[in-house]
Image (cartoon, helix red, strand yellow):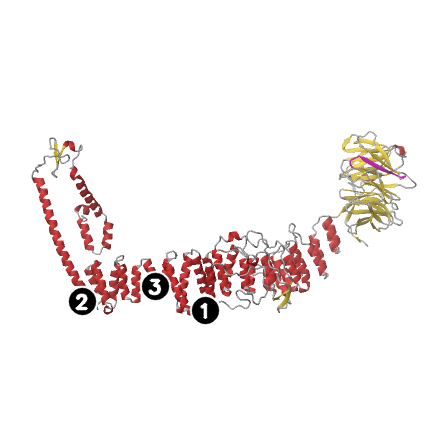
Amino acid sequence: MWKSFQFFERHLVQGEQGGPHPFFQDINVTCTSSGRGRLVLGDAEGRIHSIDRNLNPLTWDAYEHRVTHVHQLKLRNILVAVGNDKEDMDNTSIKFFNMDRIDVDGPHLLRMLRITKTQVVPITCLAVKEDLTEVVVGMCNGAVVSIQGDLLRDRTPRQKLLHQPGGSEMVTGLSYTSQEAATLYCVTNTKCLAFSQNDQRRFIDEHKGADVNCVAYSDEQELILADDQGVFVYELDGRGSCFGFEGNKKMLLWFRSYLCVISAQDGPNPLDSLQIYDLSNKFVAFNGSFERVTHIVAEWGSIFVLTADRRLYRLEEKDTRTKLETLFKKNHYAVAINLALRTNYDVIEIYREYGNHLYDKKDYDGAMTQYLKTIGTAHSPSRLEPSYVIRKFLDAQRIHNLTSYLQKLHEENLANSDHTTLLLNCYTKLKDVKKLNEFVQDSKLNFEIETAIRVCRQAGYHEHALFLARKHHEHNWYLKIMLEDLQKYSEALRYMYTLDFFECEKNLKKYGKALITAIPAETTQLLMELCTSYKQRLAGGAMSSASTTKAGLAKRTSNTAIPTSHGDAKALAKPPGDKTIVSSLLEKVGVEVDNEPDVVEIEELRFDEDDLSSDVALGGSSSNLHATPEDFFHVFVDQPDWLIIFLEYLIKATKPSSTTVDTLFELYLATCGEEDCKELERRGTGALPLVAESPLSAGPTIVGEDPEMPPLATPSDPLMRQALDRGREENFHSEEERDRRRQAAMTILKDPRVTFDQDHVLMLCKQHHFKEGTLHMLEKLKLYEEILVYYRELGEYNNVVKTCQRFGDAEPNLWKAALTYFVECDPASCQEELAEVLSNIDRRNLMPPLMVIDVLSRQPNITLSVIQEYISRRLQQQNQWIQEDEKQIKTYMEETEKMRQEINELKTSARVFQLHKCTSCSVPLDLPAVHFLCMHSFHQRCLNENETECPRCASKNRKILDIKRSLDGQVAQHERFAKQLDGASDGFTTVAEFFGRGLFSPSQMSS
């Protein structure tokens, strides 16, 4: 039984005054047609009425007697009509009217044709090709006549009899399937036929026909027939579906996707019923009764019904939303979905309502089927929030449905990190390892890799987490799981060898401390290679090259047992602060989860051919890159001995930086003392004992070893091999090793090829009380006074004197400092050293005697015997200097007196020039001659013009004048005077020197 709805509203077409429209009351309609926005009616008086949407008619006299058929073309605005100008059939004609050209008496008549091929009998049906190349008429005697050609231009179009008349057969329907195929349906009251383009006849059904007006044609070019038994659908290849609609069928009409059927009702009242069927969805869209129906036609999106009492009814289809609401109220969701799909209506909301309906009925599988349809695609995402569905299926009993929904989200690339977390959580809760394997191996799925790895790791499925990390090059996650969860140190280190330089460097900075603690020798080897000549390794230990190599994760051992701990699902949720709607619901997933570890069999995980094609880089570029050693110092925090081995190798193999040398030097000093070694032993800096493995051999493992991972090979560099062998001996704290490190520290300081921060190294030497290194650095930095202070702090009097003897010439103030130091010491313990200092001060004349006496006077315990020799020697020397000064003063006074007498003579007495020869040319003098006071005479011709100075004495005089000017200039340089006075050992001598230069002369004093 088909469901019945009222999807059409029935209205009577009324006039301005109300009641039935008077226009239709005045005409006797014989035929109808529609198209191009107009209704076309033909009446018994030969008139044709073309009515627009506002029911304004265009009426003209097409025939003198009767119009039997009208047909409005769809592609061209041409109306084809059949009618009679007289009552006899001989005057039947076919007329073509141009509806775009309106003359005075109506539309322009383009052509009129008459049928001549057969006996003219009443025409029952008409079919016209849209291109007007053929018109076909069917007659009441069963004849079918085709008129072919250019119907508007050919003078005499060709007429052809397609079907011979016979018996009581009558043609009841004609229609073309399409313009391309040009197949003609022909229906009689006894059979169905089809004529091809070349007029070949083919029977569709030889035993089934239909009456006039009981033939319709669907939009899919299907032929629909109706009789008292039902409705039958035909295609060109034969009968299709059929529907058992009972009743005496009078008319059929195809409207959009509906079939309108008018049937005569039984009973005393002459009523006809109208049913509108939706054949695809199998429901009745309208059911109503009318007075005897004479015609039915569709236009303007409505159905028009004309009854015998000349009333016109209009059936308007309700809007889609209204129809859907009706269906929702009756829970007919399947019908609503089909209706929405047909009308391009948004169907997502219907799926949601349908899913909610099934969910309320406890049909969870059916509800999930509908919810799955709400998922859109990456290009057309759904407007239904996934959390709406997820919230409904979080109970443990419905987790299978939730899993299917989450899988669909991932297949459509619409999942976020929360969805991935929830899906993997469902897999682990269900222990569905097969699904989990398919998920991680499906290369078509698009999901957040880090989220998937994190969930698998937290759920205990380390094998799957490692698979994803290796496949998608999440090296950080791979190493984190290997080291923190599985403690597979050797395999993690082997994995690092497969990484390119930059990835290996980055991850070694992060995980180097754990590796150096567990397997120090192997990790140190990798660090050495990374800082010198790192080469990426491929499977089997081969070095990477430019050849293309398949780089895939090893085939995991089949059916490997993995202990997994399924704890509270809170661990799978995101951290606080990153919660979404889905995240807030994750806690519910872990309800009734067994907390005991389970053994889950993992099926073999395999990579596709190209899964990891980019995992192996070409080794040519890596060999030219070198890591910075300083970046890895932090990984040796608890392994100073291995850091020493690492740095010693770098100093031998490369040109180290000053920071590297400083660090190695500091380590030497920090570990070469006995107390330092005891402290290291107390802290326990040796390698941690491992349960899982030994450094080079595989021990008890949690997961199977990767057979394609490169082995940890012995280094080919002899320096590296020697360094690592020494480290494996673990003889770090022996006396022999401490002596070696002290010697190595001094070797660093003395090697001119090694660069280091000298100030920093000096500080380290002092901090660690490294005497030999401290003295060496102070001497290298020429900090001689610091050496003196250092010996002074140690109380080594003899070394204080030796320091002054070694560096006293370069730094005379050392003797002064030594004098001050010994004065502050006990005089009884350093009399010899004090005497030596006084002797050198006296010999070098570093301090005036009064200053020395002043310094010595600060120590009340110094006896006269200590300084007697110094004072006697200084007094004798002072007497000698006085005698020399008095003698020189006497000489200067005599020379000064002589000069004064000579000047006086020049001023008061005449000079007699007794030279007879020219000083320049040695020729006897003749007049004119020039005589100078220096007693030189010249011919005037031997002198230059305007020369007023003796040529022989000019250079000497000029030299003296230059010296005088220089001295006068120096006198004015007061800063230089003050500087020399501060740095002079004898300030009086400096003052006397500048006094002699005229520092305090009247001219200088006035300036």
Residue positioned 29% across, 60% down in the render: 785
Residue type highlighted by circle 2: Leu
Q: Secondary structure at mark 3?
A: helix
Residue 769 in percent (x, y) is at 36, 65
**Residue 920 locus on image (x, y percent):** 15, 35
Q: Residues within 10 Å of mark 2 (few under 14, many from 20)?
A: few
Residue at the right extreme of this rendering: 167
Label 3 close to label 1 by CB (< 8 Å): no
Q: Nearer the viewer, residue 938 or 865?
A: 938
Say if residue 577 shows up in the picture: no
33, above or below 810, in the image: above
Magenta stretch contains residue 958? no
How far apart in space, not on screen, are marks 3 and 1 (Cα)?
29 Å
Q: Which residue is mark 3?
A: 772
Answer whether residue 134 is magenta in the image. yes
| Image point (22%, 55%), residue name | 984
Earlier residue among tags 1 and 2: 1
Q: At which x and y percent is residue 733?
A: 43, 68
Q: In terms of secondary structure, where does tag 2 sit?
A: helix
The numbered mark, 3 or 1, whose residue comes first in the sequence reads 1
Type of amino acid under label 3: Glu
- Which residues make up the magenta segment? 130-141
Label 3 to label 2: alpha-carbon separation: 38 Å
Asked where in the image residue 467 lies, by quadrant, the reply is bottom right
Taking the spot 80% from the left edge, 49% from the top edge, the residue there is 277
Q: 999 or 542: nearer the eye? A: 542
Which residue is label 2 attached to?
864
Q: Circle 1 sits on which residue?
A: 683
